[in-house]
Structures are given as structure tokens and as C-alpha cells.
Image (spheres, helix red, strand yellow):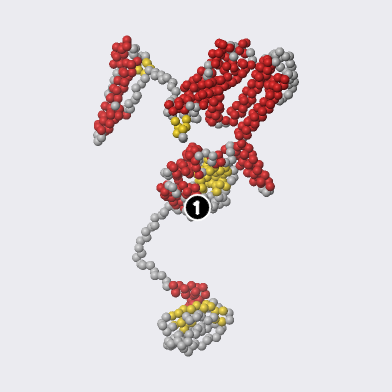
Amino acid sequence: MVAIDRLFFAKDTMGATPAQVTHQLSKLTQRLRSRTARVKQRIFHSDESSTESSDSDSTVKKIKPVIKEESPTKQARQVPTAPSLEEPGTDGGATRRTWHFHRPRLPASIDPYTDHIYVLWLFLVALAFNWNTWMVPMRAAFPLGQNGPLALWLTGDYVSDALYLCDILLLQPRLQFVHYGDIIKDKKEMRKNYLHSLRFKFDIVSLLPLDLLYFVVGFNPLLRLPRFLKFGAFFEFNNRLEAILSKAFIYRVIRTTCYLLYTLHLNACLYYWASNYEENRASVWTYDGEGNHYIRCYYFAVKSLLTIGGLPDPTSLFEISFQLLNYFLGVFAFSVIIGQMRDVIGAATAAKTHYRTSMDGTLAYMASYNIPRAVQNRVRSWYEYTWTSQGMLDETELLEQIPAKMQLDIAIDVNFDTVSNVELFKGCDTQMIHDMLVRMRSVVYLPGDFVCKKGEIGREMYIIKSGSVQVLGGPDGRLVLVTLRAGCVFGEISLLAVGGGNRRTADVVAHGFTNLFILEKKDLHSILHHYPDSQRLLRKKAKRLLSKGTKGPKKKAKKHPEPIIPPRPQTPKLFRLMMSVANHSGLVGRLVRRAKRGEPVAPEVPMEPTKPRHSQSPPTSPVHQHSPSHRRAEPPHGDSDEVVSMSDQSLTIHMAHSSSGEDQLTVGTVNEGGPNKAKGPGD
């Protein structure tokens, strides 16, 4: 009905004005309240007796809710609530609450591996089993049934029998089982599986009603020996309890100790029975009947099984045979129990033994190579802190033993919250982040260790699990720029930088004992190969972050107005070459001084008509007027040359006029002995 009302309400409010929507909300509220009143009426009518039916009807009519006129906005804000359990009574002031009790019911199927309630039930069955195994031999050997509280023994016996019976009828037929990899939860299949099991046969034999023979042979506790066949529940309880305990080795030690005590208990019962068997012969070996029967016999069993010594020598053949058997049994049982105890303690301390062995081997290696004492102390500190903080040296060794799916589940619980908060990975595929979590490894850094140094190629990113790191900078590289603590991430840009990775821009040092998660670039690239969308997104983010760190804000170029006068044309290259040579040789300053004195700037060179060249020979440069060397004669034939000596010792510029009308410029040097030949076009 509520769904229908919502449907009509949605249909009525399509395209309606706010006032119409408010009116529809008020009508919906009234219908819900009236429906609530009718439900209350039915509840009270079912609870009242038939004799008070008339009074109940009148009462229900009186408690019909009255709808007050409220403002449209207030009615729109009201939300329909569920019917209350408290209603005013007929007297007007009293209240009444309706309670519904549900009978406890057993589940249709029980998971024996994860259900803790089932483990608790196995504990009760194990107590019943221990009652029988401890009390039946003691009551059979010692005179407890005749002189002791017989009602107490019978009560304990039949309570344990009731637990056995409930386990057979109610619990065992409901246990799930695995058949060819499938978990079977069908009632018939579970019952059939239990009925065809060997455990069912043992359970049935353990409950044989041999106690009825008490009326024939009298009270004999040995008739309850079949109760020992319920040992399956006891060992199952041990396995299930060890599976849920965080320190199961403690329970194993207690259980092994109980095995030893039970062996001594059986030996004490056998010794008292042997003493009664030899009661017709007075012997120092048998129990003399003084003191507490059980305590004195238990003391003898301890000295006998543990081979402490100090026992009286047996005299008869029976006593000697019993004592020899007792010695053999004691040595065997004691060695088995001690060996089992050693295995339990060794398994409990296996991780610490591995830690000690690794540290001792590493320190011995460093001592053999004369490693400095400071380095050895740091290695020892790393071993001690890693063991104290993690309880193991390498977490990957432990996780490699379980399937990949379980490794992923553990990694998600440990690292997902930290990695998902990294800005670089926000918006990426969740499955990609899951794959990254498996590739991460944990590394512990000591105080003062450099996590990364300035200038080195960044090939991994770091996530701080515990501790803190300091980013150093400044002129001397010792200024603390920022301190990063648990949950912070650094080095993530280097994962997607091109060209082999960007270089680190600062030193990062561990401030204290720091535990970091490391993700290498090669692992990320192998993951991104299967997630192209996330790869494109990460590249965009990496480029944006890199450009943000390397480039400043772009400045808009100012537009200059066009000049009224056009710019001056560029100086020709040949003229610039000549000016640079002149500045280099000092010719410009010399020519300026000559011009100020009124002297000619350059000698006049007569020009002759151009004649065809018969032989190509290098022209000779005329000697400067200030040069001490003589002037060479001009060639009778050939092109006309113009030689300008720029300096007495530095440079000579030679210009040749060829027959083709082109001018060739040659620059030469002048040595101390005279000018060199200028290179012509044919040289």
C-alpha cells in the first residue's frame, strides 16, 4: 500500500506547483496516520480477551489520532513513522507495551569451521568426555562408590549422557560438509552424511545403556567404559579451539601437561588395584592403607613413572612384573610427552629462533670482514626494531604461503585506506589499486638513514606507515623544509616521469624509526598495461603536477604599438666581418687619428685595365708605407689587385678583381720576417 501511495504521489506531483506538492504531501501524511491507527486497532483487538472485546473496541475508537491543522511547510517536512508500542490505556494515564518473544531455534545448518557457538558446544561435550575418562578409572579402583557420595557420581554420569545424546540428535546431523568442492547445506544430505560416517557408529556405541546392569551386578563403573568412544568430539574441540586462538601454543602446552597428569592418574589407579590384589601378602611395596588413598598412590605413580627412585623393592613375581611394566611404560610415556612438549615450544619460538640465527650470522659476517663498529651497531638496531615492531623479519615470507586472493584481502585491510588517499591515484580503477597493494613491500629505516638523495633518479614512491621523515634543502642541504608523518606520500611523481624518471630535488631523511611502503616503477608499469584508462588519467595528472613544479605562471605578452619610422635594416655580413677584423687589429682607431691630422686614410692604388689571365699565380701584397719590408713589383699581366695592409704584424686584407667582374677578398697574417702570401682564389 505504501508503494501504491508513493506511485500516485509521484504521478500527481509531476509538473505541479509548490503549493500543489505541499497539498499532496499533507494528504499522504493523513493516509499514513489513518493506516497506522487501523494497524494499532488490529493489534489491540488480538491481544484483548473475548470477554473484554467490547471495552477494547471503545478504547480503540477513543485513541484514534486527531489530525491538527498545520502549516503546509510543516506538514511537508513531516515523515511517517512506524507504529509505537506504547499506547494510552483505558484509564487515560497508564501505558501498555506489547512484547513478542521468539523461541530459540537451532540453525538449519552449522559451519563447523567458523561458528563459535559450535565450538562452545564442543567444549561442553569435551567436559563430559573428560568426566568419564577421569572418574571411571578412579571409581573402579578406589572405594569411592561405596563410601563416597553416590548421588554425585550418578548425577555427573547422566548429565554427560544427556550432552552425548543432544550432540547426536541435534548438532551432528546439522553440520555442513564438503563434497567434491561443494559445501552441502541440505538437511537430508547432512543427516545422511552423519548416519553413514564412522563417528556416528562410535557415538551410538558410546551411549549403550549398560547402566541398566547395575540392577544385576551392582554398581560397577567399568560398565561406562563405552563412553570413552566419544573421543572424536574431544579432538575436534582441540582443533577448532587452536584455529581461533591467537596464541595457540599456550593451549598446546596446557593440553600436553594434562596428558602427563592423566597418565600419572591411570598409574595411580593401577597401583592401588595391584595393592588390593596383593592384600593377602604383607609387603613393603604395596600400599599400606594409611593417609589419603588417592594422594599416596599418586605420589607412588610420580616416582615410578618419572624414574625418580627411592621406591621399595618388589618381592613377589607379580610385583616385579608390575614394576617392570611400570618402568617401561613410564620411560615411553615420559619421552613421548617431553618430545611433544619440545615440539610445541619449538614451534612457538620458531620465529624468534630464526631472528636470532639471522642476526648472529650477519654480525659474524661483519666481524670477519672487519666492518666498522658503528655499522654493526646500526645493523643490530635494525634487527631489534624490526623484530619488536613486526614480530618477524620479512612479512612477504609469511604471505607467500597463502593464496593470492587471501594476500589481496590482507593487503586491502592493511594498506587500502592509505593508498586511496594519494591524490595521484584518485579516480583510478579500484581493481588497479588492489593490484598495486599486492606489489608493495615494507621497509624499515633507522634514524638518520637517507630514504632518497638529491640528484638521484626516482624509481619508486613511498608511503609512510609509521614514523616520520624530513625533507632537507637549503644551501648546505641541512635545512628542514617539511616533516612528513604517518599517512603521507612522497616520490609519487617519479613513477610516471618520462626519460628514465625525474631526479630528486631534495634529500629525504628518516627522523626516527620509520616504516615505509615502497612501490617500484616497473611494478606500476606492468599493472597499467592492463588498465589503459587509468594509465591515461595518471599521465595527465603526472604532466600537470610536473608542469606545476617546473614552470611558473605564464605572463601575457604585451602588445607594442607599431613604430611610425620603420626599423633600420640589418648590416651586411661582409661589412660586419670587416669591422670585426678592424676592431681586432686596431685599424679603426688608427684611421680615426689620421683623419683628425688631415692625413690620407688609405694609399691610392692605380687601376689598370683587366687583361686575360695566362697563368694563375698568387698575387703579391704591396708593403705598407710604414712597413720596413720592400714593395714587390706588380705582375705585368693578370687581374688588378688591391692590397690594404691593416697592421705591421697582424693582418693583411687582399682584394683581387677578376675578369668575370667578381671581387675576391682574402685575409692573411704578417709574420715577423715579412708578410705571408695572401691566399687567392686558386690556392
Give the residue displayed 48% in from the left and 78% down from the top. Answer: 666
Secondary structure found at label 1 = loop
Q: Is residue 399 positioned above or below 255 on the image?
A: below
**Number of marks in the image?**
1
Which residue: 41% across, 70% down? 570
**Left or right position of 6 against 445:** left
Which residue lies under the disc numbered 1? 501
The residue at the point 41 percent across, 82 percent down is: 661
In the image, farthest residue toward the bottom: 636
Could you tell whether 365 is left or right of 71 in the image? right
Judging depth in this view, the residue of 507 and 282 nearest the camera is: 282
Is any atom of residue 131 visible in this view?
no
Q: Is 181 rendered above or below residue 682?
A: above
Viewer-closest of 237 and 617 = 237
Image quarter for residue 319?
top right
Quick check: 263 above or below 540?
A: above
Q: Position of residue 74 (x, y in %)?
A: 31, 28
Looking at the figure, which quarter contains the N terminus?
A: top left
Q: Amino acid at mark 1?
A: Gly
Q: Is residue 104 left or right of residue 53?
A: right
Residue 557 in sight in this render: yes
Q: Residue at x 61, y 34 (%)?
A: 347
Q: In the rendering, at what x and y percent does residue 411 appear? A: 50, 39
Residue 655's place in the image compared with 434, above or below, is: below
Residue 354 in picture, x, y percent from top left: 62, 39
Residue nearest the viewer, comparing 237 with 522: 237
Q: Position of residue 148 (x, y in %)?
A: 61, 12
